Every structure is written in structure tokens, then in C-alpha cells.
Image: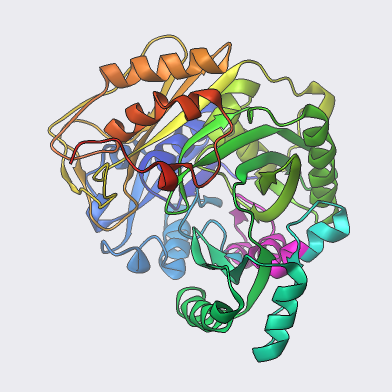
Amino acid sequence: MFDTVLIANRGEIALRIQRGCRRLGLACVQAHSEADRDAAYVRLADAAVCVGPAPAADSYLNKEALLLAARASGAGAIHPGYGFLSENGDFARLVEEEGLVFIGPPADAIALMGDKISAKRAMIEAGVPCVPGYEGDLPPGAHALEIARSIGFPVIVKAAGGGGGRGMRVVRAEAELLSAVATTREEAARAFGNSTVYLERFLERPRHVEIQVVADGQGNAAWIGARDCSVQRRHQKIIEEAPAPDVPTQLLEEVGARCVAACRAMGYRGAGTFEFLYDEGALFFIEMNTRLQVEHTVTEMVSGLDIVELQLRIARGERLPFAQDDVRLSGHAIECRINAEDPRTFLPSAGRIGLWHAPGGPGVRVDTHVVSGYTVPQHYDSMIAKIITHGATRAEAIARMQAAFAECVVEGIRTNIPLHRELLADPDFAAGGVSIHFLERRGTALPA
């Protein structure tokens, strides 16, 4: 049992975790870099500890500094949020060895699912459908060509330790394969410290559908609906929604049950997300995120559950407070990620926000750490806020989002709000079920 949590993250998710802690009467210690020293959420914490200079490698990714901060502050647990060290099995193990609680799954589960090859093998064994491919380190030369031919072109070369859209290349012709494999290996070794690559069939127009799970590590687990996260730029999600439009309920129930079984088999604890490609009426597993997702908010809006609170309760040793049959979903929710970036080029737009005015009204939620006068640092991810709307129907949720953007004011930097407004008005998006290539194939309708 613990009564104080070190929050090893920054921005809106740090503030979100603070709110979850307060609901349970837990004290919050906010870890921060020198660049974030004056952020409002740092002042709102019960205590704050500087863990290093602005670069993430010297602060939010500095394992020893974070452990020292936990020891010095008397924190009994560390919440990693998402990104940074949230899916680092070595960090989770160090936290456990220190006698602290890592608010997330066991280190072994993170390691198992962090390697895409071992994850696929585990899912195949659990009966979770996977993209056809080769579940092993791709052999060199002619053997790789033989494997690719057996799968069928086009194929995609993926790094076993990859993530975030990095470490993957589409190959449409045999002549391109060996060069793509070599380049991906080199990139993977540099970015992830693991040069292992594997092959999958490349699906031309899939959707990105994911299933939220939560488990207590004591044999109790449930899945909480599905999300669609197909609107992406450079493999990074910008719009998410729940439930996933036009995916058969029976299919989701079957696959959701298998995901829950997989959680029980690996002794999973906490929140997690199984990610799939949905194509021609079938779901194909691609990876599991062993952490809280940015888009957990849309699941909360349709389920009425507080996923961060569930993480904290489970980490304190409590059992999951509901069974699968108790999960009830209502209405539709959409999340738009607001990034400090040029809406056409996606180049970051750091700087001082002169005026910030957040929207409100029925069915509108804003998760942000931004206030007027806040300076967006250049050192981190460009997301500054998430706007989430809920309605009885998808059309109502979209209408509320459009109204929210009419109220939202951000002065001093560029944001992707103009792009969001264009996308919400796009007839293909309004119809539902766009593919992950929707944004790149659509281009932007924004003026130069």
C-alpha cells in the first residue's frame, strides 16, 4: 500500500494523474525538468522535484534521477503516464527492485509485449488473430525473398522493438526488399538498440481499431469497448473515437474475450490496449501498448469509468471492481489532439501562448496543462491539449466538436486546429470508417 505517488511525466497527462490521485486521497509528487519548472501543473502538485535539464534523455528518461526523486520525496509508487519510460521493462524492474510500486504491468509483461515478435507469438497462442507474416528475425538474402514471396507482396518490414511509427518500410516489389531490410535494421539498431526485423503482409486500406483492457493481476480482467484511431499523420494519431464505427459487435466480443484471456495468461496488471488493423471484416493484431493511452478519454466518456483511478486502485492491490457483464457503453465520443504545429507541414511551433481560451458546454471535456502565458518548450512532443466531445450519436459528437472549435482560442503559436476543422467537415470522415491512409491520400484543403 502507498499514499504518495511520483508522477514521472509532464504536460496534460501529469495533471490528469494528479486529479486521479486526489480522488483517492493520494499525495502527488511531480517530477519535472528545468524547462517545465514554471508550469502550472508543477505548482499544483503537493511537492515537486527537478530531475534534470530540459532534454528528455537527461530528465524524463533518466531512470536513476527518477528513482532518486522517489526516494527523496517518500513516494511509494511511480506513475509513468504514457511515452517516456511508460513501456520500459528495465525501468519497471528497477522500480520493483527498489521496493516501490510501478503503476503499470509487471516488468516481464512489458518485455514480452514490447518485442513485436514475442508479442505476436503470444497472441497467436492465445487465439488472437494476427496479420499474416513471418514471426521471427528475418534471415538474410534469398531466404528473405522466399519468405516474402510466400506471404505475398506488398509486405511491410518492421522492427521488433519499434513503435511510434518508426522502424517500418513498405515493400511492393521483390527488387526493393533487401535494401529495405538493411535500412530498417540499421534504423532499428540506432533507435531501439535491437536490429531484429520481421515481415507482415501490407494491408492497403485498413483501419486502426483498438481494444481497451484492464486487469488486476489476480485473475480478473475485462475489455472496455473498442476505439477507432485511423486518422493519423506520419503514423501518429490525431483523432480517435469510441466506439469504432461499423465494426460488427460479434467480432469485437469474440476478439475482446481472447484479449482478456491473453491478459490472464500473462498475469497482466493495470490498463493496456490491444491494437489491430481492421480490413475486409477481419481484425488483425499488430501490437499491445502496456500503458495508459492518450486516447483513454473517449473510452472513459462512453463507459463512465475512470481508467486512471482503476490503475491506481489496482496498483494498491485492489481487485477489479466490476465484471465483464457490468461494462455498459453509452453514446459516442471523439477526441481531437491539439498540437503546437503548422497545420499543413506538421512542423513544431514552440513559443509563448499569449491567450488560451478553452471551450465548454454539455458533452465537452478538455484535458490540458496550458494556460495563458504558457511557453511551449521545443524539447518535447507537440501536443498541448485534447478536446473530447460526447453525444448520443456520432453525428452529435461531431457537431459538439465543431462547436467547441468555434470557441477555442490559441494565440501566439500555430496549432493544428484549422486541420481538425477541415477534417470534421470532410464527407468521408463524416460517413465513418476511413482508413489509416485517409489523411495522406486526402492531402490538406488548407490555404498555403
| Residue 96 pos. (x, y %) | 63, 62
Residue 52 location, quadrant: bottom left
| Residue 179 pos. (x, y %) | 52, 83
Residue at left 81%, top 43%?
260
Q: Is residue 109 magenta?
A: yes
Q: Is residue 251 left or right of residue 85?
A: right
| Secondary structure predominantly adopted by residues drawn in magenta | helix
Magenta segment range?
92-120
Q: Residue furthest bottom?
A: 141
In this rendered view, identify the residue nearer to me: 369 or 202.
202
Residue at left 32%, top 35%?
419
In this rendered view, identify the residue nearer to me: 85 or 4.
85
Q: Is residue 305 visible?
A: yes
Residue at left 70%, top 74%?
148
What colour scheme has been applied to the protein in the rendered image?
rainbow
Q: Is residue 52 left or right of residue 180?
A: left
Q: Is residue 433 above or below residue 49?
A: above
User: Which image quadrant: the C terminus?
Assistant: top left
Total count of labels: 0
Q: Is residue 304 visible?
A: no
| Residue 263 pos. (x, y %) | 79, 49
Q: Is residue 128 magenta?
A: no
